[in-house]
Image (cartoon, rainbow, N blue to C red):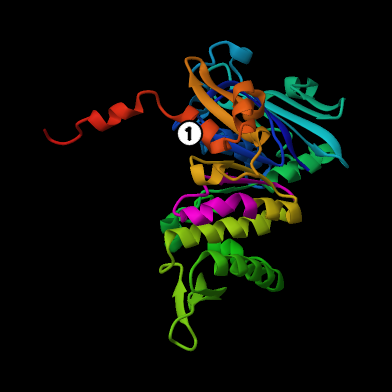
Amino acid sequence: MRITYLTLRNWRTFKNLNVPVGQRLIVIGPNASGKSNLLDSIRFLRDLATPGGGLQDAIRSRGGLSRLRCLFARNNHHGWVSISTTIGDDSDGEWTYTIAFKSERHGLHRPVVAEEIVMRGSKVLLRRPDDEDDADPERLTQTALEQISANKEFRTVADFFAETRYLHLVPQVIRDATRAGDLVDDPFGGDFIARMNRVAPKTRDAWLQRVTAALQIAVPQFSSLEIVVDSTGRPHLESRYTNWRTSGARQDERDLSDGTLRLIGLLWSLVEVGRKGAPVLLEEPELSLHPAVIRMLPTVLARAQRSTRAQVLLTTHSPELLADEGIRADEVLLLTPTVDGTAGVILSTDEQAVQLIGSGLTVAEVALPRTEPPNIEALADVNIGNR
């Protein structure tokens, strides 16, 4: 299965956004236009469905309802914050899941479910609030998606969202996992090596071989990658590089470059999540990587998707990545800030863009100039020194 459509209302920077989503979606736009916010809407659904998560925790971890509600919302969609997705594939038909939430009345101000709808095809399986909610309003502090006793008819949807992975690894966090505390599935990498180590040994070794094969091409003199556990029980990445020594030089995550760590994370995530075809959310995967490696990322992603069925949604500012000839206009979402929230358009629906791409220009040449701040040249005239 995959996400086929995403609708956001009053979600962060988006007042109203409707986006068709293919097997790959590349999100571009100026800084602060909402690229990360779009990915976070899918992370939010994952947080609803993940054991130990749920509506209250998902909103609390994001700073509360006031931080999620779009500043331009006013009376749009009753002022509710809403996320709606359609998921499915050719063999399983289509599911639609919609969740809207608002602030509780009577001075309590807790976030509560304003609307929750689950449909399979045209059949409505769940519509809330319902009579039980009216009889016990406390039920509205939770979604049906997060409750095993309530989501039996659509547990396929809950499981799909729960398998979503978000990757924005911070190398410094990977090197010092204590920064993340007891976080599980930390998107910034606090438990990244521990998560690798939790995989069954035979499977883990097979995946490491696949990751190593790619690293041997992308990283000069890279030889091998494995996981070793120190005397305190803490797992480490251990790599070897070929040199004048017969056995090669050993390094762990503290010695690896930022780019190598981020590339390991990217490759591992594609292997780990792709086996179930769930969404992989990549935040600027080009960071710290050599331009030659960046140019190959679309090919690497496409090959991984063919073998694993993973759906990839990524944000980028990279001209090298967007210059790939295999990127189609219907895979690119261009975000543009407006006086009424951020607007989004799929590039293939823009007639001028289609004509320019048809004339031989790349997506990068057509789309990236539209993401530049107006009058950016004036930045060079700004005096930020002491005089």
From the viewer's perspective, is 52 left or right of 145?
left
- Dot 1 falls on a residue whose secondary structure is loop
Classify residue 381 as left or right of residue 172. left
Q: Outermost residue toward the top?
A: 75
Amino acid found under the numbered disc labelled 1: Gly
Whether residue 189 is visible: no
Query: Is-magenta flag for residue 289?
Result: yes
In this view, 8 is above or below 272: above
Residue 174: tell me if it is visible: yes
Q: Nearer the viewer, residue 75 or 170?
A: 170
Residue drawn at the location 54% of the way across and 50% of the way down: 187
Nearer-the-camera pick, 327 or 264: 327
x and y, in percent, of residue 352 in the image? 60, 22
Query: How many residues crowd around disc 1 within 10 Å: few (fewer than 14), some, or many (20 or more)?
Result: few
Considering every residue shown, the one lying at the far front of the view is 359
Rendered location of residue 141, percent (x, y): 64, 30
Q: Residues in magenta?
A: 277-300
Q: Left or right of 199: which side holds 110? A: left
Q: How many marks?
A: 1
Q: Which residue is tagged 1?
A: 63
Height in image: 310 above or below 111?
A: below
**Extreme residue in the bottom direction:** 246
Res 21 quadrant in image: top right
Residue 265, how many percent across, how many down?
55, 58
| Residue located at (52% from left, 41% from top) | 316
